Image (spheres, rainbow, N blue to C red):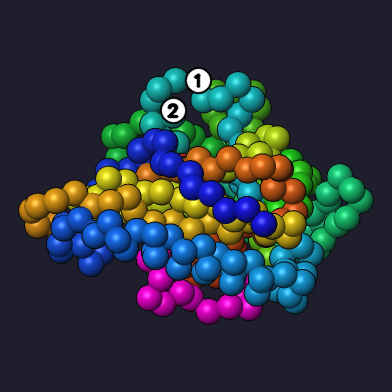
Amino acid sequence: MRIRAVNSVSLLATVAAVGLAVSGCGSQPDGDAGADTEVVAHRARQVAAAWERSTAADAWRAGYYPMGDVIQLPRGGLRSKADEQAYRDHSFVRQGKLPATWPRNGQVAWADGGSLTRPLAGAKDLYKSLSDGRVGGKPHLTVIGAKLGTMTLATSRGPATVPAWLFTLDGYTSPLKRAAVAPSKLPSPPIGRARDVPVRPLNGLVGVAGDGRSMTVVALHGVCDDGPAVEVLETPRSVVLSSSVKQRKDGGNCTKQAKLQQVTVELDRPVGNRVLLDAKSGQPIPYKPPHGPSPSWS
């Protein structure tokens, strides 16, 4: 079991009004820093111990949980800055009809031979998840058809081949793919949410590196501190991330706003099928793509 600190690396978003209690900006006394560090480390150890050989961990390892993007762009990517902006803005229009029928269930298949049957969403529903329905004069991408196929994506159990809707875009020779299979329901955590512990909830997982030895998460911090920091506790069966803020700056009054910032976490060994856990909530950290809709964890 090893715990260490990891620093934030890149700004994801500027200011979002989320009602943080950050009305004061005074620095914390130096004497409290060591005590807080031990409290945070103790909480991480509690979370890891609760999940160790728990029924929740068994359910996690048996389920289908995306750890990478459930949307794959056409081969070679989008062809222009305007198309890239349209994708980020969810600016899609549809010409023609989309399939009205599809199989009720589909198979998720892993390289080790494991498989899982999961419900499939229809092409119309997933098209709605791509488009906000408001185009006007903005640049847009045009969907002219769709068919059911497959795609390969990263999951908590390694790469998996999953059913996907292949949307044909006007002007592109290869489709935009959207995973059609619903993720498994998150298991009930064997430990409650932390109270009176100086950790903050993480805002989601952005992605895991191809070698599994690093991952990027989104952390929350106030407008008057020096940014987020994430500590990592690795055990043979779990990786627990504890998010906090660096020492606050002196002086002034803080508004009730927050910043979202990407933090890259380096691991001693690949994450593999270990459960990735948030120390604050005691729950697995769900994948949230930097662009586009999130999968439904239900």
Nearer-the-camera pick, 34 or 141: 34
SS class, disc 1? loop
User: Is 39 located above or below residue 73 in the figure?
Assistant: below
- 94 sits to left or right of 255: right
Measured as percent of width and height from the top left, residue 69 is found at 59, 43
Q: Main secondary structure of the magenta part?
A: loop
Residue drawn at the location 40% of the way across and 71% of the way down: 197
Measured as percent of width and height from the top left, residue 253 is found at 9, 57
Measured as percent of width and height from the top left, residue 291 is found at 46, 42
Label 1 neighbour load within 10 Å: few <14, some 14-19, many 20+: few
State the quadrant of the C terminus. bottom right
Nearer-the-camera pick, 30 or 141: 30
Nearer-the-camera pick, 51 or 208: 51
The circle drawn on residue 79 is 1
Tell me the residue that label 2 is attached to.
83
Marks 2,1: beta carbons within 8 A: yes
SS class, disc 2? helix
Residue ranking furthest to the right: 113
The circle drawn on residue 207 is none
Q: Is residue 77 magenta?
A: no
Q: Which residues are magenta?
A: 186-201
In the picture, residue 146 is in which quadrant?
top right
Callout 1 amino acid = Arg
Callout 2 amino acid = Asp
Measured as percent of width and height from the top left, residue 143 is found at 54, 38
Residue ranking furthest to the front: 31
